[in-house]
Amino acid sequence: MPANKKYLTTSGWLRFSKIMAGFFGGYAVMLSLHLLLTLVFPRQNVLATAFFTGYILWAFLLLWAFIAESIWKVWLTYVGLTLLFAVPYYFLQTA
Amino acid sequence: MDNRKYNIYFHTHTVSGIIICAVLFVIFFAGSFAFFKDDIAAWQKNTSYVASRKNTTRDFNAVLDSLSRHHKLKGRDFEFFLNKNGVAAYVSMLPSNDSIIKKQFKPKPKPKGEEHGGKKRGRGRGRGGDEDAASFAYDFTKKQEGDYEKSYDMGEFLYRLHFLAPLNFIRLPINLGAPFGYLLAGLTAFIFLFALITGFLLHWNKIVSNFFTFRPWAKWKTVWTDLHTALGMIQFPFQFIFAVTGIVLIVNSVLLFPFTQLAYKGDREKVESELYANDTTKYAYTYQPLTTQFDLNQFVRQTEARLSHSQLTRLFIRNYQDANMHVIVASAPQADASFAGSGRLVYRVRDQRVLSETLPTAHATYVDKVSALVHHLHFGDFGGRPLRVMYFVLGVLGCVVIISGIFIWLVARDKNSTPAKERKFNFWTANIFLALCLSMLPVTAFTMIALLFLKDPGQSGIFHWYFYSWLVLGLYFIARRNIALTNQQSLMLSTILCFLLPLLDGAVRGNWFWSTYAKGQLDILFIDALFLVLAVVCAFTLVKIKQRNASVTAVERVEHKVAA
């Protein structure tokens, strides 16, 4: 039996928004988090670690966009987290 | 797990799976065979690398000599990328650093942006693009250069097919930083990772209870489901590794590019030197001739003698015959000596001094370790042939999981409550996907048989035989509109063709099992044996299907009688 439609997204726009939030928003969170980590650890090591953690984290963030109850919550969380990670990185990074 | 989440996992798993299934099958199928890339190449060329490695010495001087017949070598940089099989290399020769020599050579005007020919990245595919540079594949056994198109073989074909390189000719309207084929392969790998995660979560509650559940005598839907979940679960770690390392190997620029821009301020060379231990040192050109005699072969022999349990991977010559000539040798440890590591030796020819040396087995940086993990896990080259056979079996089982997934998808929707239009669409999707997937094995065997009769087919020859026969067989199966028939006939064709392959190899080239064994041509022997085993497996499956169909029809007949 296919999945029960009762629990699935029916609106095309909502589905599109979820995919966008998960794919691009998830990517932004993943990238900014790893960038922030370069402040603490050697950057090449963070980059190498991201070969594994980055893609896996991204896939989970994509999934969460579908799981979350509200798409607004997803967008807010992803934008918020990206800012949370990116702002300190921007100000604290050394040239 | 609440119902809502369960259904979301279910749906996202189904959708992502059905989107990628056909492409993923091609990747898994071709990739599984690519574990035996060198063996298939040896089989096609009828020259065993295993046998010839023992009596081939790599003559680097001969390469330079043959180049010097048509080029002035003074002041040039050379790069040798040494093949793992020990008897081949990709060689690239860069333009001279000597501006006087460079001036004598007048390149034809080129379109803007390409004229800077100093740096040609990577292994030259085909004759170099620059007028005064060259890159080619070199065969140390035959002591001759083969150009890429001509020396292309079936092993290379399947290897490159598995990351969809043949699709690179498709041009996208916007430049996304990678050719179309690689992008598609990378996107497929990422969606695959997503499908793996959702599939795992979906099955979470039943992992323990259903671990050994396999009901081959139940109805088809149950068989497919059991096959999909049982095999999928057992294989999960393997497939997860391949999804992640696959993304890293094919579209890592998705991560590297923004990272370079942001954390490295766009300094690509810095990233490369930190990540791949690439030598980006610039050695100044002095315009003073080199007075010391230098024998490259002797140097390589001496260097190899210093390294135990390692092999040379790259050899760079900078400022050939200039007083500031340097030779840089990169090496990698054999997996049994050290899982990770990279060695490098910088040698100044003028005063015969080793300027710096890192032994490959001595230490490994964190980056070395991660990169070793990605490469070894993906290529399965850390445990010899038994491990590669295991990888092959797991890869082929991956194909089975994909096929059973398509069947579940189709069978679950094949009921009266589904609208007729939707059912028609579902049938055609499954019909086309299965026709293309299941014809791959017979087509592969067929192309390899054709190669027995072709002399130097090159890239275009292999492309024609493989893709046209795939097209014909695929269209035939699609046109028959009968999935059971596709299944049976492709199995039958596979059995016959896989059996014919070792038979014809014996009849046409005298490569019977015992003669290749006696000559120590283990790689050729292995391919013949592999296809014989595949033939037996296909025949066994076919017999089992026939038996089952017979018993099912018998039961139906009885039921019919009872009803009557």
Image (spheres, coloured by chain):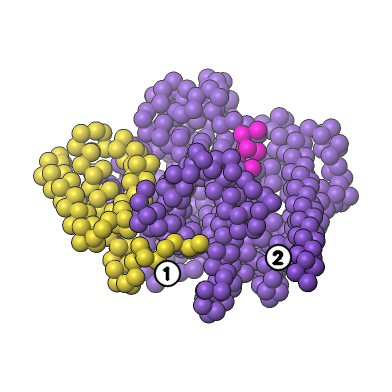
Chain colours: A yellow, B purple
Q: Which residues are magenta?
A: B386-393
Q: Earlier in the sequence, mark 1 or mark 2?
A: 1
Task: Please tell me which residue is depicted at 53% across the width and 22% down the height of the picture.
Answer: B337
Question: Which amino acid type corresponds to the residue marked 1 in the rendered image?
Answer: Leu
**Residue A86 visible within the image:** no
Q: Which residue is mark 2?
A: B484
Q: Which residue is mark 1?
A: B172
C-beta proximity under 8 Å, tags 1 and 2: no
The chief SS type of the magenta part is: helix
**Residue B457 versus residue B322: which sits nearer the camera?**
B457
Bin the neighbour count of mark 2 within 10 Å (Cα to Cα): few under 14, some 14-19, many 20 and up: few
Q: Is residue B513 left or right of residue B94?
A: right
Q: Is residue B78 left or right of residue B427?
A: left
What chain letter is assigned to the residue under label 1?
Answer: B
Of all residues, the one furthest to the bottom in this rendering is B421
What chain letter is assigned to the residue under label 2?
Answer: B
Residue B153, given in percent of the width and then of the height, sits at: 66, 52
**Residue A1 versus residue B510: which sits nearer the camera?**
A1
Residue B496, located in which quarter of the rendered image?
A: bottom right
Q: Which mark is residue A94?
A: none
Task: Please tell me which residue is depicted at 35% across the width and 51% down the height of the picture.
Answer: B2
The CA span between labels 1 and 2 is: 37 Å
SS type, badge 2: helix
Magenta region includes residue B387: yes
Magenta region includes residue B251: no
The image shows a total of numbered marks equal to 2
